[in-house]
Amino acid sequence: MYAASREASARSREALRAALTGSDSAAATTGSELFAVVAVLDDQRSLRVALADVSVPGSARAELCERVFGGKVSAATLAVLTTAVAQDWSRTADLIDTLVLLGQEALLESAANGGRLDAVEDELFRLGRIISDNPELEQALSDQSKPASAKQELLTGLLAGKTESVTKTLAEQVVTRQRSGLGLAFDELSDLAAARREQIVAHVRAAIGLTQQQRDRLAASLRRIYGKAVTVHVQVDPSLLSGVVVRVGDDIIDGSATGRLEKLRRALT
């Protein structure tokens, strides 16, 4: 984002925090309603352009937002929306992306309020792995020629009775809007949940499954490196032959046999 959108995003996030303060029950409703508003804006190009038009005073854009969505969403959601559209955004897409992010954060807060954030984080990671490991499933869930209802029905069948309601809502929103890279999108959501708990996530590929003791030792080592608590998510990848590959943000630590062989090959050439 450019500077204007970064500032607008920060003010919108402040509005979300204010709207949710003192009400544990508002978070889930606000998150779901923000996703519903995004769906409307995705479908109505003229409306989303009008709400982000910097040639029009912010107060006028806020009034338009209130006329369109007033009475259709909760007071907390409307407060967030009117604050967001009153800001000057560098691009219309930045406004939409921020509303999506605020919806995600509100839903994760609702999970935290209910003591279920750990479960949601783990479910999002596992769902991302299931989709990444099944190309046909990923293609079906990201196929833009299929109506959103068909993809939601497929996802509902996959998740029925197996996940938290927050996980299901977040997953449906991702599948509805994401055109590709669904596995990465779920990883990002899992990372967002970890950040909500003031932790960072280590994505680990291992040649064989790790014991809990090995996971704990790895988490402790990474905590010493990064100075924060670390959540370890493990994906078994036999192609590594032995060892592990650890990704934390943009950092990659390759301790696998294939990684060592590749380093040796480069050294020899």
Image (cartoon, rainbow, N blue to C red):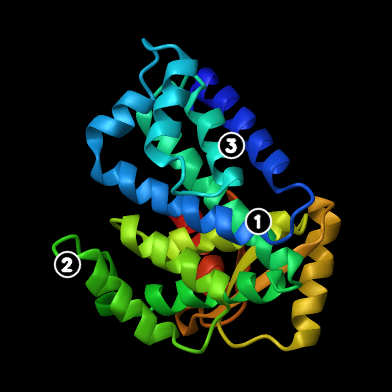
Residue drawn where x is 73% and y is 71% of the image: 114
User: In screen coordinates, is 125 left or right of 200?
Assistant: left
Residue type indicated by callout 1: Ala
Q: Residue furthest left?
A: 145
Instruction: Quadrant for residue 55, please give it.
Output: top left
The percent position of residue 13, horizontal first and vertical second, equals: 63, 37
SS class, disc 3: helix
Q: CA distance from mark 1 to mark 2?
A: 33 Å
Q: Are marks 3 and 2 in contact (CB under 8 Å)?
A: no
Task: Name which of mark 3 and mark 1 comes first in the sequence.
Answer: 1
Q: CA distance from mark 3 to mark 1?
A: 12 Å
The percent position of residue 54, horizontal first and vertical second, equals: 40, 14
Residue 26 numbered mark, or none: 1
Instruction: Quadrant for residue 246, please give it.
Output: bottom right
Q: Nearer the viewer, residue 235 or 97?
A: 97
Residue drawn where x is 25% and y is 65% of the image: 148
Q: Is residue 65 above or below residue 150?
A: above
Residue 50 visible at all: yes
User: In screen coordinates, is 142 left or right of 88?
Assistant: left
The percent position of residue 113, horizontal first and vertical second, equals: 75, 65
Nearer the viewer's eye, disc 1 or disc 2?
1
Q: Is residue 186 above or below residue 256?
A: above
Nearer the viewer's eye, disc 3 or disc 2?
3
Q: Residue furthest front?
A: 71
Task: Name which of mark 3 and mark 2 comes first in the sequence.
Answer: 3
Mark 3 sits on what residue? 79
